[in-house]
Amino acid sequence: MVLQAETCDDGMPSFFDPRTVAALFDGNPAAVAVLDHELRYTYVNPALERLNGLPARSHIGRTFSQVLPGLHGQATALREVLTDGMPREVTISGRTWAPTEEEQQLWRASYHRLDAEGEGCGLMAIVVEITDIARQREELERARGHVALLSTAAVRIGTTLDMDTTCRELADFVVPDFADVAVVDVFPADLGHTVRRPEPGVVRLRRAALRGDGDLDEQVQRFGHPGEYIDFAADAAVTRCLTQNEPVIDDWENDQRGRSARTADRIAASRALGLRQALVVPLTARSRPLGTLSLVRAEGSPAFGDQDVAVARELAVRAGVDIDHARRYDHEHSIARELQRSLLSEPWGPRPHVEIATRYLPADEDVLVGGDWFDVVPLQDGRHLKAMGDVMGHGVEAAVAMSQYRSLLRLLAQEDLPPHEILEQLDTMVERSGLDRAATCLLAVVDRFGGVCEVASAGHLPPVFIDPGAAGARVVPVPVGPPLGTGFGGYRTASVPCGPGTVLFMYTDGLVERRGEDIDVSVQRLASLTMPPGGRLEDLLDQVLDRFGEDAEDDIAVLASRIREGPPVVRPTPAE
């Protein structure tokens, strides 16, 4: 990750305004620092203050070695990242000023260079303490007779940051080498309003993974498919395990304990399949319960011993860390998706006379927010201004700039100006505002009475018109002015025929731009798009993304619009 900016102020990228950085990272659970080109702290978030045991004022203006002389392993990496711009991850050992009983602590740090105009202006550091994880690894290695199993677990569990995938990997890993059946149940992230609440005293978990050996795999599905919610009574082994936060062995062959009807029925069904014993261990991370791992052995398999319990517990600890990482990653991505959804909301205002369909597809699953945007603003006479734009760059900074562009555009649209005049004024406002990210933009207004579409472009790719039932689409070249934010102006409006039922299709360059291919050649492929009379706009966008979006290297935003069919309308006159 190399963050880009166009200007450099005092050695730091211009977009790293203290208030912006604080808004982005103050609430982040990960420890984050920003350093200038001389590797001095310019920002630390509260998480890093707690980790280092020092307030932010004791960091600012000082280097790593000055603030934390007891740490080792980062100086060389910092200089290398600043020199070549390649991100690095390093393990740091030593002690900070934070109180701890540990003789030595370990952290995993990732460093990314911050660039402005091709020059390294500083670094961003993200630090996570891994002392507990390191200790767990040592304990796993000491487990006699299970070293091979546990070392293999590190390779096969947690290969992705998807929680359900991690849970499936855990269940697949222990069957059949360690258990005949494995079940992973986790606490739901959010029950929501559509899920009924459990009865008092009942623990509700979501089944994340279920795996049986051989024929058992199909037979045990009766106990709940992955994705279903499972209720456990107070006397169930899962409930007791979570309550005590300790492993629980349930011996179904020699069990004399009184059971509730719910639990007794499950045990009876398990015995009918030849299952004899269950070992349930808690899945935890950062002292928080995540769920349980249930290991079940059938007739013919040895009973669980003390060493099995120790290994299962250690395996659950390791898996708990992976599951927690995946859950936190999913939570952070959910926040990013909500941010993008709020910035790239559904087109604005009521649309009684026009049909609209839109899609946004990020090119990188690790960067869910970006600068592509679309909007539909209602005008007089039932007309609508359609906008498609693309702010230069990616990430949160581009998304924030996109929001500013869209807000200004909505303000100007209310004056009901021709598209080229809106672009002229928008270009002027952006230049005066100091917004340092240029953007392309395509504006279009369909006159449903005159059968024409007025289009103006600020450095954007041409619109596509798809006539109903035609053998192909029309890629219409329109006069192209400079991108917004340059201050050059010089935009023009073109009139394009747009009859009843014609679809106006607008897009960003991520849909068509491909490395090693002329952009004009890529755009002309859109001429193959067709639309049957009365066809659904959503189906058209599915077709477009299936055909052209698979190999995208950039974010994609697409918008399709069409005047709603109905009885002939007559343009109202001023007297009316």
Image: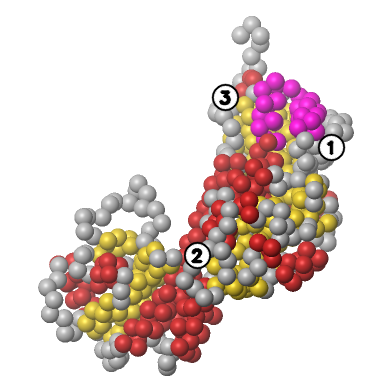
Which of pointers 2 and 1 lies earlier in the amino acid sequence?
A: 2
Tell whether 564 sits left or right of 225: right
Q: Which of 4 and 444 is in front in this view?
A: 4
- Place of residue 433 in the rendered image (x, y in percent of width and height, measured from the top left): 76, 32
Residue identified by numbered label 3: 567
- Colour approach in the figure: secondary structure
Which of pointers 3 and 1 lies earlier in the amino acid sequence?
A: 1
Q: Does the magenta stretch include residue 352?
A: no
How far apart, in angstroms, are the residues tagged by discs 2 and 3?
Answer: 76 Å
Q: Residue at x 68, y 36 (%)?
A: 404
**Numbered-mark total:** 3
Which of pointers 2 and 3 lies earlier in the amino acid sequence?
A: 2
Residue 171 makes an appearance in the image: no
Q: Which residue is drawn at 52% across and 75% down?
A: 103
Q: Which of 370 and 126 is in front in this view?
A: 126
Overall secondary structure of the magenta stretch?
helix
- Amino acid type at circle 3 is Pro
Tell whether 338 sits left or right of 243: right
Q: Which of marks 2 and 1 is in front?
A: 2
Q: Nearer the viewer, mark 3 or mark 1?
A: 1
- Amino acid type at circle 1 is Thr
Callout 3 touching callout 1 (CB < 8 Å): no
Q: Give the range drawn in magenta.
A: 405-433
Other-residue count near label 2 (Cα within 10 Å), few / some / many at <14 / 14–19 / ≥20: few
Residue identified by numbered label 2: 99
Tell whether 303 sits left or right of 24: left
Vertical relation: 43 (above or below) 415: below
Residue identified by numbered label 1: 486
Vertical relation: 71 (above or below) 123: below
